[in-house]
DNA sequence: AGTAGCACTCTGGCAACCAGAGTGCTACTT
DNA sequence: AAGTAGCACTCTGGTTGCCAGAGTGCTACT
């Protein structure tokens, strides 16, 4: 796709159509353009431009006597060439910053807040995944006696994630003994990945070694899982969009949003690229995402721990504002994740 | 509501109407009843019975020339007097049991599996809350040095819940020192509620005391929160129900399901009663739940840690099967929670 | 290149119509 | 008294025809 084919005015007309349609959800006709924008030409001229834009595949009309509507290609052209980057207004930014400040200490609230903020400011459905590393590394482990032969294993990974697991041991154990074993493991395994545990097995007591096996297993599971649990919010909002009102669409959207697998696919596809991404109608390749747009950004500390966040909305979305919001929230989250890792070492 | 007004046959007719309508989603008329069931009377007689059931407020018809449909009252009568308790078929039970067996050790999977199983077996939307106690009690704490002045506090509560919190300390601390403090706190605070911490403050070192304040705060927050995070699944499925297809209904359902506040209200209302509950159309008192039925059951160890699970579906739901499924999953969950507490002491 | 004017097309709403389904009632039977 | 046959009545949902309104596309003109 290139910008060369269109005259200045045609580009303006295309921009107007997209913006009007985004706002009103109504096909926009030549008359209303001529009346509401001072293009210095009559509606007939605009009609010619519209016809040309349609021949180029950027616009279409639902039926002969309706106004024009952007095609997927039209939206892509708009996002790539015509759109102005919008920053979130500073008062909104300030308020969001305050909210993030309030949960700074509670890591388990970060994602919830991100999705909630995104959903509210963009009027779309928001999603976020927890930061993950490629290979988990051991940070700290604790064995807690629950009762009798039940022991709770609490594992802290270097990226700050906490995993728990219930163990059955052969015979009742005292918290005292369990702590000794925890200490032993913490001493030898800190900073290691599951694969590197093997180096240390020789140094461990038999029971500690058993636990180490288990920990390695847990860590491997974490790594193998294609994506961590996804937070979501704002589903109800996008169902208000008129284009989703019709029959089967609702179900498709809810399914995409609930099921995770489709989103994971996209998320994985954009796993390692840096900047913000706009996926319009699944970029034609992902059938389930037909008629939806995603705006996604990666956040975190690259090569250390990164996650993905963004929104899902109708094609007819305010891309400028949405991208501004996603970019801003991603930046805030990055700040907070960096905080865990300390100044870049 | 009582059972006395209706003759044997009228009750049978009501049961047939409910069951047919649940299956077909079509209003059921006197002819089809006479044809498909051997009641030994003609359709005219059934018409009389239907008219009577309608006068009693148990049935209604959408318009003059349509068949009958149960009213909310009709469903309630059905559930209370006419319904046969259905147990889940044994092969389904076995398979579910296997699945639960596989995640026995991973507590963080329990709720996810519960909702997933319920959603699949009942074809409705499922929800579950984590087990909670009225007053949290301290079990174990760990302080983990993250880097510089950042410390991660990991708190294990007696009911098995794990909370984490990020701390900023005045000066960098060694893991060694942090462990000493953790041990100090574990020694003095184990089994205590936040309110009871005060007894021990005198025995603690200054820094440990500061941490104890913080822990008390965290525990208080946990207790104050009206309900723990809710797991959900199967939303897409119930949107297939024809009665939800129409306009605003979808949004209302998604909102109820997503927003938590309404569900919390109900959940709290049935917080302390033992058996399974069927809430039909919000029992007339909760407007948001109009045209939906909830089937809820409490699970866990009473007076120790209990949670709630159940499903949300259309009024037109197979109550027998749904109740069987909810009861079964609640029993499994109770087993697993009991396991944490050990044999009733 | 741009414009005025006009014929053409398609939608969405409205009214009229009809077959089908199911009721409610009355008069009759057992 | 309980049940039944028969029939008039009512309401829906689909179909058809119609019309105003909106917007286009084309041709002839500046």
Image (cartoon, coloured by chain):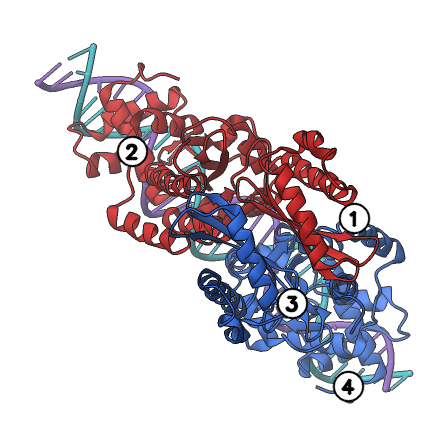
Chain colours: A blue, B red, C purple, D cyan
Upstream in the sequence, badge 4 or badge 3? 4
Pointers 3 and 2 in contact (CB under 8 A)? no
Q: Distance between the residues labelled 2 and 4?
A: 68 Å
Q: Distance between the residues labelled 3 and 2?
A: 47 Å
Residue assigned mark 1: A102
Residue assigned mark 3: A293
Secondary element under disc 4, as helix, strand or loop, is: loop
Q: Position of residue A71 (x, y in %)?
A: 66, 74
Pointers 1 and 4 in contact (CB under 8 A)? no
Upstream in the sequence, badge 1 or badge 4? 4
Pointers 4 and 3 in contact (CB under 8 A)? no
Q: Residue at x 46, y 66 (%)?
A: A213
Q: What crowding class fits label 4: few (fewer than 14 Cα within 10 Å), some (14-19), or many (20 or more)?
A: few
Q: In this view, does B67 lie above or below B245?
A: above
Q: How far apart are marks 1 and 4 (CA)?
A: 45 Å
Residue A307 in the figure: left or right of residue B7: right
Residue A206 appears in which quarter of the rendering?
bottom left
Residue B213 in the figure: left or right of residue B45: right
Secondary element under disc 2, as helix, strand or loop, is: loop
Residue A237 can be seen in this image: yes
Q: What crowding class fits label 1: few (fewer than 14 Cα within 10 Å), some (14-19), or many (20 or more)?
A: few
Q: The residue marked by circle 4 belongs to what chain?
A: A
Q: Quadrant of the C terminus of chain A?
A: bottom right
Residue assigned mark 2: B85
Please tell me which residue lies in front, B7 or A203.
A203
Residue A41 appears in which quarter of the rendering?
bottom right
Residue A301 appears in which quarter of the rendering?
bottom right
Residue assigned mark 4: A3
Q: Position of residue B324 (x, y in %)?
A: 33, 39
Q: Position of residue C25 (x, y in %)?
A: 32, 19
């Amino acid at each position: 796709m290139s910008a060369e084919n269109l005259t200045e005015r045609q580009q303006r007309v295309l921009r107007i159509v997209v913006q009007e349609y985004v706002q009103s959800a109504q096909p926009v006709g030549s008359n209303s353009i001529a009346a509401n924008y001072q293009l210095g030409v009559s509606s007939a001229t605009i009609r010619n431009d519209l016809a040309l834009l349609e021949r180029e595949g950027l616009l279409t009309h639902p039926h002969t006597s309706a106004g024009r509507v952007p095609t997927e290609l039209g939206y892509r052209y708009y996002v790539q060439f015509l759109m102005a980057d919008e920053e979130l207004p500073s008062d909104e930014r300030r308020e969001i910053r305050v909210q993030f400040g309030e949960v700074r200490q509670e890591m388990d609230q970060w994602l919830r807040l991100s999705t909630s903020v995104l959903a509210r400011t963009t009027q779309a459905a928001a999603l976020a995944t927890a930061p993950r590393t490629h290979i988990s590394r051991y940070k700290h482990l604790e064995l807690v006696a629950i009762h009798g032969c039940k022991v709770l294993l609490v594992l802290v990974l270097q990226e700050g994630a906490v995993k728990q697991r219930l163990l059955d041991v052969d015979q009742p154990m005292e918290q005292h003994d369990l702590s000794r074993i925890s200490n032993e493991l913490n001493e030898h395994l800190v900073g290691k990945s599951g694969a590197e545990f093997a180096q240390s097995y020789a140094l461990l007591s038999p029971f500690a070694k058993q636990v180490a096996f288990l920990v390695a297993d847990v860590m491997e599971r974490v790594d193998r899982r294609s994506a961590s649990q996804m937070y979501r919010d704002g589903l109800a909002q996008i169902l208000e969009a008129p284009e989703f009102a019709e029959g089967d669409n609702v179900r498709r959207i809810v399914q995409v949003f609930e099921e995770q697998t489709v989103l994971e696919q996209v998320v994985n596809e954009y796993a390692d690229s840096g900047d913000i991404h706009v996926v319009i109608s699944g970029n034609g390749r992902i059938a389930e995402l037909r008629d939806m747009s995603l705006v996604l950004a990666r956040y975190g500390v690259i090569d250390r721990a990164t996650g993905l966040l963004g929104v899902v909305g109708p094609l007819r979305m305010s891309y400028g504002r949405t991208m501004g919001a996603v970019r801003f929230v991603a930046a805030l989250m990055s700040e907070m994740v960096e905080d865990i890792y300390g100044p870049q070492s």
